[in-house]
Structure formats: structure tokens, C-alpha cells
Image: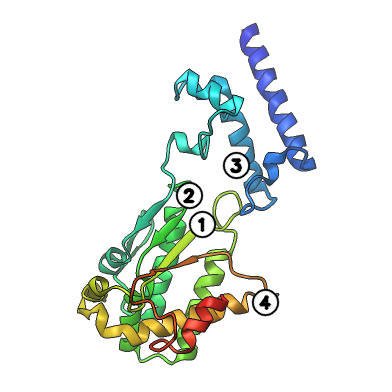
């Protein structure tokens, strides 16, 4: 009984000390992640990390020698303590999301049939995935898979840009645990990969020709995105996420002969 009371007092004292350090921002780990924000949700994450990321706890999960070397600074075990239970980064198939729709414990959505829905499904999927991974959520060929919806919906450039602007804002709001935005990445293929262009386009969960049939619309997606990255939010601050990745192949249009002003937008952004 006495031993239990001492242990309880010790943990209570630790929690109080951590609370004080967080509120005063006296601990460098309060500011360790530039993607988090000072908040109750972030405090809970900080408290969890400080209580679990301790040698006596980590030795229950990892080789004692590795734990010793980590705290001595000889090696670094990344993303502790979350990495004890969940993976780091992951890449998802946007095609599968478009084929299956979103199936969650609370609500089920049919496969997207319109551009705004297809974009919304990806953004919400990223948020859900971010709960089960410590690092980035990524997907490839966002432009090519989104392009068929633009053609089917007959959208104007202004409407496409508005929908994508909504996605950028949504993915940068601090709505993930820890009062942070999910770390996201999208790869834009444009017309640089012949193999990708032969891939199957999906609309409403069904095949809709080849991705190469919608290159013009994919270029529209890229142009709108890079314009938005340059414009930033209401204060002109840049959008941190999703980080755009471009495929640099022999077909990349460095001179703008095929892509026109898009090439310059890419370099500016």
C-alpha cells in the first residue's frame, strides 16, 4: 500500500512538473514540432510523450542497449513513443479510394461521381489515415485521377480552382490530434509517364477510359494548384500542405513548349 502511494505521488509530481513546463514553454520539446500548436490537445500529446518516452518504459518494448544508446545520443529512434505501436509514413492508392468510396465506422460514402466529392474524399481519407500513422500521408497521380471528373462535370477553370482551394485550406487546418494539420503529400504526373497515362481512369467507381484521355484536365489541376500555392491564404501565408511532388522524367517540359505558363508557375512555386 505504501509503495503504491509513493508511486502515485511520484507520477502525480511528474505530471504537475510537465504541466508547468508546458504552460511556461520551458521545455524545448514543447516547440520540437513546428507543425503543432499550443493547445489542450497538444498538451495531451506532450504529456503522453513525456510519460511514455522514458527509459524504464521503453525497455519494456525495445532492447535495453538500444534505449541506452538513444538517450546517450549515439543513435536516434524516430517518432517515439508513437512508433512503438504505429508505422511512420505511407502512400495510398487514390484509384482505390475512387473505386471504393469511403467506408468508416460511422458513415459510408459511395464512390465519388463529381469532382468536388473526389477531392473531399481524399482530404478526409488523409485525416483518417493520419490517426493511425506518425508521418506523412501521400498519394500519386492526384492530377490524373482527378482530371476525369472535371471533364464529366464540364467545370470551368474558376470552379476547379475553387474546389482545390477548399482542399488546401482543409488540409492545413489544425484538426489532427495535437492541434496540428496532417502531413500530406500529392504527386503530380501531368504527361510525364507513359505507363501512368495508360492506367485506368475511375469515375463513380467504374472505369472511364484511360488516364491519358484527360491530360488537358490534369494540366488544369496542376495550374490551379500552383497558382494557389503562390497566392497563399488570406494573409498571403504559404500553404504548407499537401506538399506537391513532380515526376522528373525525360518528358518533363522544361521549356514550356507543351505546358505553356504552367512550367513557369511550377518554377515560381
> Decide: marks 2, 1 in contact (CB < 8 A)?
yes
Check the image and tell me how it is coloured. Answer: rainbow
Is residue 126 among the parts visible in the rendering? yes
Q: Which mark is residue 12?
A: none
Residue annotated with mark 4: 234
Residue annotated with mark 2: 135
> Decide: marks 3, 1 in contact (CB < 8 A)?
no
Residue annotated with mark 1: 183
Of pointers 2 and 3, the one earlier in the residue sequence: 3
Toward the right, the furthest residue is 24
Q: Nearer the viewer, residue 211 or 149?
A: 211
Decide: is 43 above or below 187: above
> Decide: marks 3, 4 in contact (CB < 8 A)?
no
* Quadrant placement of the N terminus: top right
Figure quadrant of residue 2:
top right
Residue 143 placed where, x, y %? 38, 75
- Which element is circle 2 on? loop
Of pointers 1 and 4, the one earlier in the residue sequence: 1
Amino acid at each position: 500500500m505504501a509503495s503504491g502511494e509513493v508511486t502515485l505521488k511520484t507520477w502525480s509530481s511528474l505530471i504537475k512538473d510537465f504541466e508547468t513546463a508546458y504552460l511556461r514553454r520551458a521545455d524545448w520539446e514543447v516547440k520540437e514540432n513546428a507543425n503543432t500548436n499550443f493547445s489542450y490537445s497538444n498538451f495531451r500529446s506532450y504529456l503522453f510523450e513525456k510519460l511514455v518516452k522514458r527509459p524504464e518504459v521503453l525497455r519494456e518494448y525495445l532492447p535495453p542497449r538500444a534505449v541506452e544508446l538513444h538517450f546517450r545520443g549515439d543513435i536516434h529512434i524516430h517518432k517515439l513513443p508513437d512508433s512503438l505501436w504505429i508505422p511512420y509514413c505511407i502512400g495510398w492508392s487514390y484509384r482505390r479510394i475512387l473505386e471504393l468510396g469511403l467506408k468508416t465506422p460511422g458513415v459510408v460514402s459511395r464512390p465519388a461521381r463529381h469532382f468536388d466529392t473526389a477531392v473531399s474524399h481524399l482530404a478526409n481519407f488523409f485525416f483518417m489515415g493520419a490517426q493511425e500513422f506518425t508521418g506523412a500521408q501521400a498519394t500519386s497521380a492526384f492530377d490524373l485521377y482527378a482530371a476525369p471528373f472535371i471533364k464529366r462535370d464540364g467545370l470551368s477553370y474558376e470552379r476547379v480552382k475553387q474546389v482545390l482551394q477548399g482542399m488546401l485550406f482543409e488540409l492545413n487546418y489544425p484538426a489532427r490530434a495535437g492541434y496540428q494539420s496532417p502531413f500530406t503529400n500529392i504527386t503530380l504526373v501531368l504527361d510525364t509517364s507513359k505507363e501512368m497515362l495508360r492506367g485506368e481512369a475511375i469515375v463513380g467507381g467504374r472505369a472511364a477510359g484511360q488516364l491519358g484521355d484527360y491530360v488537358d484536365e490534369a494540366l488544369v489541376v496542376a495550374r490551379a494548384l500552383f497558382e494557389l500555392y503562390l497566392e497563399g491564404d488570406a494573409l498571403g501565408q504559404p500553404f504548407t500542405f499537401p506538399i506537391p511532388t513532380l515526376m522528373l522524367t525525360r518528358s518533363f517540359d522544361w521549356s514550356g513548349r507543351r505546358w505553356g505558363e504552367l512550367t513557369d508557375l511550377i518554377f515560381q512555386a
